[in-house]
Amino acid sequence: METFSRALQTLAVFLSAVTAGLLLTTPSGHSLHSAAAYTVFVVAVVQVVAAVLAWKPGGDSPWPIGYAGVFLVLVTAQVVLGIAHVTAVHVPLGVLLFGLSLSRLSACLPLPGRSRRPGRRASRAAV
């Protein structure tokens, strides 16, 4: 479930960047970019709720709550800066959000030679 959530977040941020390009080239780009931005916001809110629900009853680590909370704060700042047309900060923050999202997604993907447990190598069967 966590991998799906991270993939959805990364896809939403990527589509927001794509629609930013459309914003520069097509008349309907503004509404598409706005819809993509609010989609990223909704996904960030859902991730905070999901992280809290996974932590409390399941006894998982609280770290995902912190990550989801920081990401939500950054997305909120991104939306506010976009509405205010502060592109000098809005664009670099968007790149940062995509990088954070992509790095979190790649951290949970099972790659050959990577163990799911930190500090251990993967078994030969996994490689």
Image (cartoon, rainbow, N blue to C red):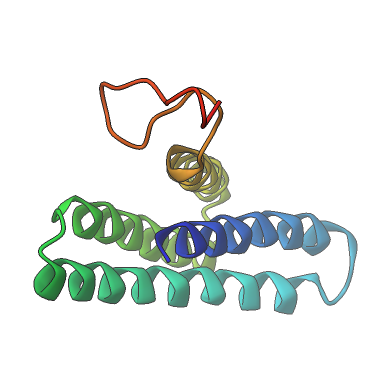
Quadrant where the image shows the N terminus: bottom left
For the residue pair 72 and 106, the one nearer the viewer reads as 106
- How far across and how far down the image is residue 69, in percent? 25, 60
Image: 61 above or below 102: below
Where is residue 33, by image quadrant? bottom right
- 27 sits left or right of 3 in the view: right
Q: Which image quadrant is residue 17 in?
A: bottom right
- Residue at x 82%, y 61% (from the top left corner): 22
**Residue 120, position as x, y percentages in the image:** 30, 22
Left or right: 39 as drawn, with respect to 123: right
Q: Quadrant of the C terminus?
A: top right
Identify which residue is drawn at 45% across, 77% down: 42
Furthest residue in direction right, as rendered: 26
Q: Nearer the viewer, residue 122 or 119?
A: 122
Q: Nearer the viewer, residue 122 or 50?
A: 122
Q: Residue at x 14, y 53 (%)?
A: 61
- Residue 92: where, in percent of width, then height? 53, 40
Where is residue 50? Give x, y as percent: 30, 73
Residue in the image at 45% along x and 27% along y: 114
Residue 88 appears in which quarter of the rendering? top right
Q: Tell how many labels.
A: 0
Instruction: Name the foreground residue: 8 vs 26.
Output: 8
Q: Where 19 sits versus 124, above or below?
A: below
